[in-house]
Image (spheres, rainbow, N blue to C red):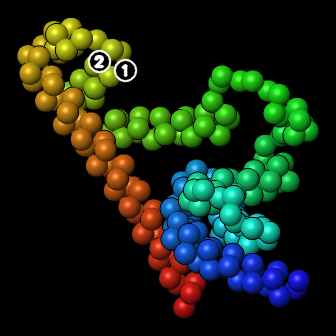
Amino acid sequence: MLHRAGDEQENIAAWIAREIIPHEAAVQGWLLRRWGHLVDVEDVIQDAYCRVSNLASVNHIDNPKAYFFRTAHTVLTDRMRRAGIVIFTSMTQMDLSNVMDSEPAADRRLEGVQEMERVNKLLAQLSDTHRKAIELRRIEGLSRKEAAERLGISADALKKQVERGIHRVIEAMMEQDARIEDAVLERMISQRD
């Protein structure tokens, strides 16, 4: 019986190396972007590894990447609760399963707010023409003709301004994400040395 348990632990360790470790940088980047100023991301990652490695089996896990993200989020939530950063109302699992809420979960709302703040900062860096074109079309929902009239440009020019502005925002977001991922990778490499 002990031999079988040892074999299962070896299988889990191999599974973690194959299915979880490749996603570590993505999870670290996500944690750093969202909560790096509140918790020690490295500790959260290590606790997540411990939780996964202590599973009796990994056969129930269909999506290892999503499972690792969720496990890291659970560790983060536990740490924040213990630190008193967020106050949670105590509910039993049965109470939680009976809650029917059409609203997005609190973590999804927080992510949405943070992502909007990020986009708004990037929009503020655009030229006035690009920013106003995007705001009128994408935020206020004006037709291309209405937005073009407000800006005093043709509808085709407005379309190009919106496209260029959105392209610049997306490029800036990709650059930010790449810098964070590079920093995480560098930190991981320096810790292994």
Instruction: Count the numbered circles shown.
Output: 2
In the rendered image, residue 32, in percent from the top left (x then y), is placed at 57, 58
Residue 157 visible to an observer of this rendering: yes
Above or below for 59 versus 100: below
Above or below for 161 versus 53: above
Given residues 45 and 21, the one toward you in this image is 21
* Mark 2 residue type: Leu
Q: Which residue is mark 2?
A: 136
Q: Quadrant of the C terminus?
A: bottom right
Residue at the image point whose x is 75% and y is 78% from the top: 8
Mark 2, Cα crowd under 10 Å, few <14 / some 14-19 / many 20+, is: many
SS of the residue under disc 2:
helix
Quarter of the rendering containing residue 16: bottom right
How far apart marks 1 and 2 lie (CA) works out to: 6 Å
* Mark 1 residue type: Ile
Do the numbered discs 1 and 2 sit on residues whose CB atoms are within 8 Å? yes
- Left or right? Give the position of 73 relative to 173: right
- Left or right? Give the position of 178 relative to 26: left
Residue at the image point whose x is 16% and y is 10% from the top: 145
- Left or right? Give the position of 46 relative to 165: right
Q: Which residue is mark 1?
A: 139
